[in-house]
Image (spheres, rainbow, N blue to C red):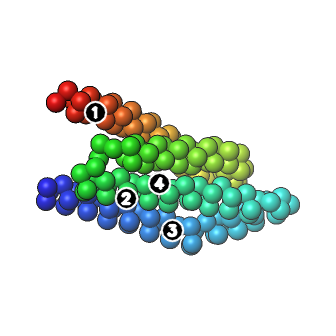
Amino acid sequence: MNVKRGSTTFLKVIIFLAGIAILALCIFLVPHIANFASSLYPNFSPMTSLIFIVMYGAAMPFFFALYQAIKLLKYIDEDITFSELSVKSLKNIKCCAIIISGLYALGMPIFHFIARKVDPPIGIMVLIIIFASLMIAVFASILQRLLQEAILIKSENDWTI
C-alpha cells in the first residue's frame, strides 16, 4: 500500500511539473512565437490570432487531461481503480489528446508558412506534438477498454460468489 501511494505521489509531482512547464511556455514563449510569426508575414494580419488559437486552444485540453490524470491517480490511491470513474477519466484523457492533435493538425499550414522562412524543425516539432498526442489517445483508449473488461470480469466474479 505504501509503495503504491509513493508511486502515485511521484506521478502526481511529475504531472504538476509538466503543468508548470507548459504554463510557463504559454506565458513566455507563445506570445514570442505569435509576434515572430506576424513579423514574418506582416501582410497577413490574422497570423497572431491563429497562433494563439492553436497553441492556447491546445493548452486547455492539455490542462484538463492533467487534471483527469490526477483524478485517476487519486482513484488508485483510494482503491477504486476498477470503477466507471476511472474509465471516464481515461475517456476524457483520450478525447483531450485527440483535440490537441486535431488543433495542431489544423494549424499545420500556419506552421508550414513559418517553417518556410525559418529552419524546418518547427514543422517537425509540430508533427511530434501531433503524433505524441495520437499515441497518448491510443494508449488511453487501450487502457480504457482493458479497464472496462476488468470491471466486467470483476462484476461477474462478484455475482458468482
Cα–Cα span, label 1 and label 3: 41 Å
Between 118 and 43, the residue placed more toward the observer is 43
For this view, does 88 lie left or right of residue 48?
left
Cα–Cα span, label 2 and label 3: 17 Å
Q: Quadrant of the N terminus?
A: bottom left
Can residue 124 be seen in this snapshot? no
Amino acid type, label 4 = Ala
Amino acid type, label 2 = Ile
Amino acid type, label 1 = Ser
Q: Earlier in the sequence, mark 2 or mark 3?
A: 3
Between 118 and 93, the residue placed more toward the observer is 93
Secondary element at image label 3:
helix
- Residue furthest out toward the left: 2
For this view, does 39 lie left or right of residue 13?
right
Task: Return the residue at label 4.
Answer: 65
Secondary element at image label 1:
helix
Residue 77 percent coordinates (x, y): 25, 56
Between 57 and 49, the residue placed more toward the observer is 57
Numbered circle sitting on residue 2 = none
Task: Return the residue at label 1.
Answer: 155
**Residue 42: which quarter of the image?**
bottom right
Cα–Cα span, label 4 and label 2: 9 Å
